[in-house]
Image (cartoon, rainbow, N blue to C red):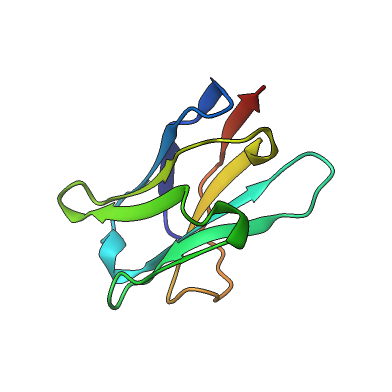
Amino acid sequence: QLPLVQSGGGSVQSGESLRLSCTGSGFTMDSYAISWFRQAPGKEREEVGCISSSDDHTYYLDSVKGRFTTSRDNAKNTVYLQMNSLKTEDTAVYYCTAATRCGVATTSWGRGTQVTVSS
């Protein structure tokens, strides 16, 4: 398991923005595909987006396309999830993961951070 430290999140109004951070400890983040998942109460976990390790190609859940962006800052060994135009349905606990490539299961998960969007 790779240590992932998450930060960011919080409570905002609908239409506002938040940025989540996911920082690797003791390993190089850009060697791994970093995915973002979320889980809302009573709902199944879903993958929100991923940034690949090979070419930094990004993938997004349809419902967040155009609003969410994931990117790397290799100097800080950190991956970000910028979330704009937030909606109440974006309320969930958000997790980052590290894997060999996007779409591959992994045991390396961050602890999660709460995002709450109110109307």
| Residue 93 placement: quadrant | top right
**Residue ID at (32%, 72%):** 53
Q: Position of residue 49 (x, y in %)?
A: 50, 60
**Residue ID at (55%, 52%):** 64
Question: As drawn, is 75 to the left or to the right of 66?
Answer: left
Residue lying farthest to the right in this orientation? 42
Q: Position of residue 2 (x, y in %)?
A: 42, 58
Question: As drawn, is 107 to the left or to the right of 45?
Answer: left
Question: As drawn, is 37 to the left or to the right of 52?
Answer: right
User: In this orientation, does residue 104 appear?
Assistant: yes
Q: Nearer the viewer, residue 33 or 85?
A: 85
Q: Position of residue 70 (x, y in %)?
A: 38, 54
Q: Nearer the viewer, residue 5 or 74?
A: 74
| Residue 107 placement: quadrant | bottom right
**Residue ID at (63%, 48%):** 38
Residue lying farthest to the left in this orientation? 75
User: In this orientation, does residue 92 appear?
Assistant: no
